Each structure stands twice: as C-alpha cells, then as structure tokens.
C-alpha cells in the first residue's frame, strides 16, 4: 500500500532480512515473468516462505532414506513419476532458455509437488524402488530449482550428494524413463477416483462396496476404429459396419461412435496409440487396493460381459 510513513517501496535489504534471500527471490521470479511488473504482497511472501519450509522438511526426509545406490526394480507408479520428471526437465529447460523464469519455477516447484502428492498416495514408500525414485526426483529437482532458490538447493544438494549444486550438471531427459502409456494409465486411475468421488458427493452416500464396470470387447473394437479413422463419424461408421458383430448392434454402435469421437478429438496420435495398448480391466484391478483405501470400501472391477446389471451397459472404453 502507498504510505507516507512506511514509504512507497519495499527495500530489498529489509525484505531479505525478514524473509530470507531465497524466499524473496522465489516470490519475485514466481510471481511474474522478467518483462512484467512485480506485485509485492506480504501475505503471499509469507506463504512462499512457508512453502519453502515444507519443501526443506520433505527434502530432509528423502535425504535420510536408506535408498539403494543402483536403480532397483521399479513399480509402475515409480515409472509414472520418473516419466513425469523427464517431461518436467524438458519444460523447465525450454522455459529457462526463453527467460520465462515464472514458467520454469511453476513447473519445477508446483507441478512436481502435485505429482509427488499423488505419488505418495499411490505408492508403497517403503519399497527400495520408491526410495530410489524419491531421491532421484529430489536430485533432479534441486538442480532445476538452483537458479530460483540457490541457497536452499545448494545446502540440500550437499547433504544428498556431498557436493554443491553448481557442481552438478543441468539435467537432461532420459528417454528410457519416458512412457506415454504409463502416464496415460495413471491418468485413467486418477480420473476413475475422481468419478467415484463425484458420485459419492452427488449422492451424499458412504458406500461399503464399489463396482467398476469396464467396457465390452466390441466397444474397444469401435474405439480402435475411431482412433484409426479419426473424428469423422461417417467414415468411422462405414468402417465399423464391415464387422458382422457390430453391424447387428446398429444404433448402439452409432451412439458409441458419436461419444468416442469427442474423446478422440482431444487426444494426440501418441496418446491414442498408447491407449490402444492399455488393458483397462487389468489396470483398474491393479488399482483396486488404492481405491478401497481411498473410499474405505471394497472394490470389484467387473467386465461388462460378466455382469447382468443394467448399469454395466453404460460402460465406455476408458471412461
């Protein structure tokens, strides 16, 4: 605020004395791009300080893990987080090369924090693979954040690696750790959990048992044709009607095509190719334990073809 008694500006030395250099630096770099004006707000700076304090505490926990030196066997959720990490490395590198410091700090700090929050919910953190993965993510994250919060990252990197962070090389994406399919599978699990949560909220219920119906094989055949042909309903119908088993389903196929076309329009060719490799029933069965713990209920994954319930007929591929 403009004030005749307190002055019209915030002096850097006073801000650093109150909040610390890394907090001030992180707030400024994260609140605006270099070519934009900064908007200093004390309450938001305090929040930034608190966020860095939480980051420090979590990093200390990870540093103290008895993780194996060599990469152990990794679970699918480990590979998901590591794949997301490679994407973040690429995004942060591009942002820094374009002087978009706000973009870089948002991805390296906040986006990775969201990924880690989901990972901690989904993973058995006592496994060697989980310990190794968490340290690998922290190691990379410290290097990505070094230009943003150099003092915090330098101290933590010395604790983790024994050398200052500036002695470490800037991270490069490891293509072996990238997997479009694994990322999509976890996206489907998260979407399923959100769908169940929405139903629970809308119905105001506390279910003891949850059934997840997965689409019949013929619906996946239709999905494959939509993915192959593209979002042209007429062209897709011409293709699927070549199948004897689909031709006799008539209106049901047409309705499904109309619905799936909307989904296909929103996905890239790589995503569609990855989805075609996903065993939806097996994926949800592997996540049943997580869903059961999340909603304190038993969970059954039932293929549409194995159920006589009317609701099962509403199942669509990957929905």
Image: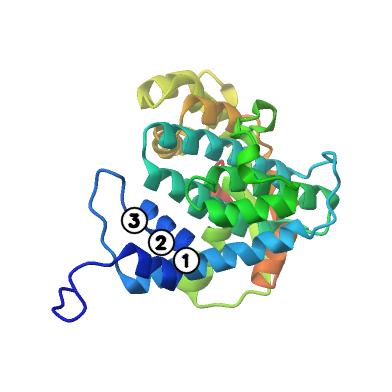
Q: Looking at the rendered structure, which numbered label has been put on residue 24?
A: 2
Which residue extends farthest bottom?
5
The spot of residue 122 in percent (x, y) is 69, 57
Instruction: Name the front one of labels 1 and 3.
Output: 1
Label 3 Cα crowd, 10 Å radius (few <14 / some 14-19 / many 20+): many
Q: Is residue 186 left or right of residue 260?
A: right
Frontmost residue, 19 versus 282: 19
Q: Looking at the rendered structure, which numbered label has been put on residue 20?
A: 1
Earlier residue among tags 1 and 3: 1
Residue identifier under label 3: 31
Label 1 Cα crowd, 10 Å radius (few <14 / some 14-19 / many 20+): some
**Are discs 1 and 3 less than 8 Å apart at CB?**
no
Q: Is residue 164 left or right of residue 229?
A: right
Disc 2/disc 3 C-alpha distance (Å): 11 Å
**Are discs 2 and 1 less than 8 Å apart at CB?**
yes
In the image, what residue occupies the spot 71% across and 66% down? 292
Disc 3 is placed on an element classified as: helix
Frontmost residue, 14 versus 169: 14
Earlier residue among tags 2 and 3: 2
Disc 2/disc 1 C-alpha distance (Å): 6 Å
The spot of residue 89 in percent (x, y) is 55, 37
């Amino acid at each position: 605020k403009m004030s005749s008694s307190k002055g019209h500006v915030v002096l850097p030395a006073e801000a650093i004395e109150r909040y610390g250099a890394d907090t001030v630096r992180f707030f400024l770099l994260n609140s605006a791009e270099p070519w934009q004006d900064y908007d200093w707000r004390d309450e938001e700076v305090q929040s930034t300080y608190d966020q860095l304090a939480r980051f420090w505490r979590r990093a200390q926990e990870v540093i103290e893990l008895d993780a194996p030196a060599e990469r152990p066997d990794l679970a699918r959720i480990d590979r998901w987080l590591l794949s997301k990490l490679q994407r973040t490395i690429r995004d942060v590198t591009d942002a820094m090369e374009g002087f978009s410091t706000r973009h870089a700090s948002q991805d390296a700090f906040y986006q990775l924090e969201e990924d880690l929050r989901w990972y901690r919910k989904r993973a058995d953190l006592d496994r060697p693979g989980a310990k190794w993965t968490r340290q690998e993510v922290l190691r990379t994250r410290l290097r990505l954040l070094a230009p943003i919060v150099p003092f915090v990252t330098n101290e933590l990197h010395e604790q983790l690696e024994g050398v200052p962070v500036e002695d470490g090389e800037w991270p490069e994406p490891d293509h072996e750790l990238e997997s479009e399919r694994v990322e999509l599978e976890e996206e489907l699990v998260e979407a399923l959990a959100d769908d169940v949560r929405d139903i629970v909220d809308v119905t105001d219920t506390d279910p003891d048992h949850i059934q997840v119906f997965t689409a019949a094989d013929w619906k996946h055949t239709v999905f494959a044709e939509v993915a192959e042909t593209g979002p042209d309903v007429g062209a897709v119908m011409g293709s699927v009607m070549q199948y004897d088993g689909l031709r006799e389903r008539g209106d049901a196929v047409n309705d499904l095509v109309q619905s799936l076309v909307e989904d296909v329009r929103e996905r890239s060719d790589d995503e569609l190719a990855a989805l075609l490799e996903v065993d939806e029933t097996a994926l949800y069965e592997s996540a049943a334990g997580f869903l059961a713990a999340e909603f304190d209920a038993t969970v059954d994954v039932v293929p549409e073809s194995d159920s006589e319930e009317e609701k099962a007929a509403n199942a669509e591929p990957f929905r």
